[in-house]
Amino acid sequence: MNWHLEAVCNYGCKFCYAPLIEQRKRGRINSNSGKRLLRSIADYGVRKINFVGGEPMLSHHLEDWIIQAKSLGMTTSIVSNGTGMSKEWLIRMRPHLDWIGLSIDASDDGIHARMGRGSKRELRSTESSHLRRCLEIWEIAKELDYGLKLNTVVTSLNSNDDMSELVSYLGPHRWKIFRVLLIHGENDGRVEPLLISKNMFSDYVARHRGKLMDQEHIEIVAEDNCDMLGTYAMIDPQGLVYTNMNGSYEYSSRSAIEVGFQEAWREVSGGFSAFGFDRRGGLWEWKKDSMGAYRLPLVEGDSP
């Protein structure tokens, strides 16, 4: 379950498929409403929640919601550009947060700058220090024994980049490689110059699999456009549940905060493919006990 809890982002990524423009016009929900939403999600049977954005670190209630989700028995994860992830924050959240996911698209910050992967202030000078900041955060998170996930979006600007040395150095538990995705009504009209062919994406993945074949501890998961469509269950900042089966977002008419997650999910669940979710590797070893890693389903019973 991906909760896009914050619509605002301080980065200018040109390929972003979740700009949440309309959601920015609406007010933020308060801490108690978010906690009520989390209880409803947990009651339905969701066992893992991923806090995403926009940029989730910009949310005033992020810590409260992570702590709440963990107290409800969910495995907790965040995908961030690293904004505000100080050593103190990482230490403070370690009892409550299981996974850190950082988005790194290139081995060089010059490429990041061309992709818009940097703070908007930096990008005005066509610069980015994204990679340097992420490396600092990664080392701290590794010392604190977080689960570590690396996300990379492949576009026309970085498809020839060689990430193998960087990925080998980072040693993530999981490396997700995405082919840049066009979402109608979100990034169409600006993402087109960044789109790449299926063959270009396959070449990128194959090249890196080959160079990292001796890194057996790194799970490489490649998601082409067809793998992403209809295989994600998402919640927007106001609690509307949505999917992306047909290349555009389809939202529930009512917020899960108002009617409960089960009722809101029922409105859009036809746009979710449990088969596709499983095929893209949606079920994976995200939680460990004293006996080692084991698999947990996203949902017990019905599967969003």
Image: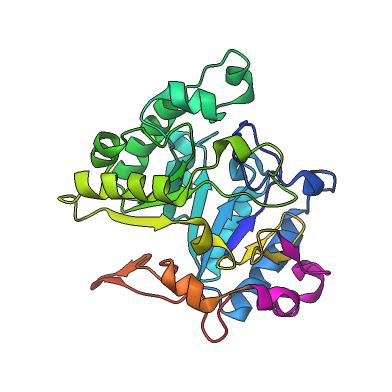
Membership of 266 in magenta stretch: yes
Q: Could one spot residue 302 in this view of the protein?
A: yes
Foreground: 36 or 46?
Answer: 46
Quarter of the view holding residue 42: bottom right
Locate residue 188, reporting x and y percent.
Answer: 70, 44
Question: Which quarter of the figure is the C terminus placed in?
Answer: bottom right
Residue sitting at x 68%, y 47%: 6
Quarter of the view holding residue 67: bottom right
Q: Is residue 38 above or below residue 149?
A: below
Residue sitting at x 23%, y 73%: 291
Q: Could one spot residue 150 in this view of the protein?
A: no
Q: Residue furthest left?
A: 214
SS assignment for the magenta stretch, majority:
helix
Q: Which residues are magenta?
A: 249-271
Residue sitting at x 52%, y 56%: 225
Locate residue 11, reporting x and y percent.
Answer: 61, 31
Residue sitting at x 70%, y 79%: 262
- Please state if 19 lies on the left or on the right of 206 as rendered: right
Locate residue 191, reporting x and y percent.
Answer: 63, 39
